[in-house]
Image (cartoon, rainbow, N blue to C red):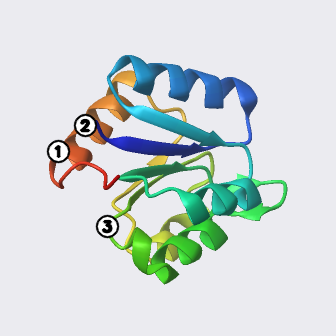
Amino acid sequence: MAKVLVVEDDRDLLYIYQTALAQAGFEVETASSGSIAQAVLQRATPDLVILDMMMPDGNGIDVIDYIRACPHLAQTQVVVVTANDRWEAQTEQRNVEFFLVKPVTLRDLVALSKRLTQRRPASRP
């Protein structure tokens, strides 16, 4: 079973994404801020991070940089889901797999998550 970390400060979207991904068979963890995401990533090795960019305690760039700096997260893929396309150039420089601008359909998000996690072996224990 693939592991996904959803990082989103909008509690409603966080719940919606978590529910849709769990129903699709993913093991889902959540974080409502960048600092919480980094704390989760210290102990977890998700296959995929679905990441909002604008959060009250920093931005998604900090989380991406953290992921890219940690050897245990070398295989973790990142999909940015944000309301503002101004982040696209910065995320391209950091090798994110996809950059999506909200609103995003749940069907598309789940399908993309499945496609990305099927490209690589399932999570390490």
- The amino acid marked with disc number 1 is Gln
Q: Which residue lies furthest to the right in this view?
A: 56
Name the mark on residue 54.
none
Residue 69 locus on image (x, y percent): 50, 82
Looking at the image, which residue is at 68% across and 60% down? Answer: 39
Q: Is residue 92 visible?
A: no
- The amino acid marked with disc number 2 is Lys
Q: Is residue 73 visible?
A: yes
Looking at the image, which residue is at 73% across and 43% down? Answer: 32
Toward which corner of the image does residue 73 lie, by quadrant?
bottom left
The reply to whether discs 2 and 1 touch (Cβ–Cβ < 8 Å) is yes
The residue wearing badge 1 is 118
Instruction: Describe residue 34's horizontal placement relative to residue 81 as left or right.
Output: right
In the rendered image, the quadrant that contains the N terminus is: top left
The answer to which of 85 and 1 lies nearer the viewer is 1
How far, Cα to Cα, is label 2 from label 1?
A: 6 Å
Residue 25 locus on image (x, y percent): 32, 24
The residue wearing badge 3 is 75
The residue wearing badge 2 is 114
Circle 1 crowding by C-alpha within 10 Å: few under 14, some 14–19, many from 20: few
Residue 96 locus on image (x, y percent): 39, 66
Looking at the image, which residue is at 54% across and 69% down? Answer: 64
In the image, residue 56 above or below residue 63:
above
Instruction: Describe residue 85's horizontal placement relative to residue 25 as left or right.
Output: right
In the image, residue 5 above or below residue 96:
above
Circle 3 crowding by C-alpha within 10 Å: few under 14, some 14–19, many from 20: some
